[in-house]
Image (spheres, rainbow, N blue to C red):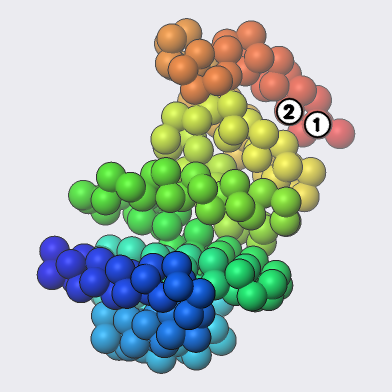
Amino acid sequence: MRMISQLTAVLTEVFFHKKAQQLEEARGGIRTGVKSLLGFDLDLLHSFSDTQILGLLNSSGELDAAKCYAAAMLLKEEAAIDALENKKAESVNTAAKALSMMLELFLSDVAPLPSTLGPETDAVIETLSPYELPFHIEEKVFRYYELTRQYGKAEDILFELVERSHEFASHGLKFYERVLRRSDEELMAGNLPRNEAEEGAAELRRIAVV
């Protein structure tokens, strides 16, 4: 809780400077926050991949959820500043790292998660939707959508993954086995009616044998 309150204070300062178009000051707040909350230099997060950053945030094989959340939020804000400065490549790269951290919090089954994390995660996915994410991050998005029962969106991502790697079809067939055990009401709520799920499974079986 202490780290979350400290993060809130850092982000409040960053938001203030962003609103005033004081972008260098906002970056300075992020840099200070990364150092004080995570114990790292911001340049280290720039140079490391999302997988390497997550390695730093694992203690004895267990994810430090508070630090992971702080890293995700700070990187997300830096990506927003990059976008304001028309640094598209930097913004996309940093946002993808932030997204990977956010997804990891869901997939690692740490609890409790901030109530805002789901909408924030969905918003970052939407922001990055025009761009091709690294395969392992897109796979995390697929797993996140299934976990949060957004089955229609999971199916859309599934076929993108299979297009990129035919071998992923076997994971997709297991996905359909799982979702088809759900009730009709659950499937409708997840925007994947049973008949559409059955059609998707049949299509994927055809792809798998090609």
Q: Quadrant of residue 157?
A: top right
Secondary structure, mark 1, is helix
> Which residue, as the protein is rendered here, is positioned at the far left?
2
29 or 151: nearer the viewer = 29
- Provide residue 66's location: percent of width, then percent of height: 25, 66
Is residue 7 visible from the viewing direction of this image?
no
Q: Is residue 198 above or below residue 60?
A: above
> Which amino acid, mark 2?
Leu
Location of the C terminus by quadrant is top right
- Provide residue 202's location: percent of width, then percent of height: 73, 19
Q: Which residue is mark 1?
A: 207
Q: Which residue is mark 2?
A: 204
> Which residue, as the protein is rendered here, is positioned at the far right?
210
Labels 2 and 1 touching (C-beta < 8 A): yes
> What residue sits 69% from the left and 21% below the top?
200
173 or 56: nearer the viewer = 56
Left/right placement of residue 172 relative to residue 30 reads right
- Provide residue 170's location: percent of width, then percent of height: 65, 37
Mark-to-mark CA distance, 2 and 1: 5 Å
> What residue sits 67% from the left and 22% below the top?
201
> What residue sits 56% from the left and 42% below the top?
142
125 or 88: nearer the viewer = 88
Secondary structure, mark 2, is helix
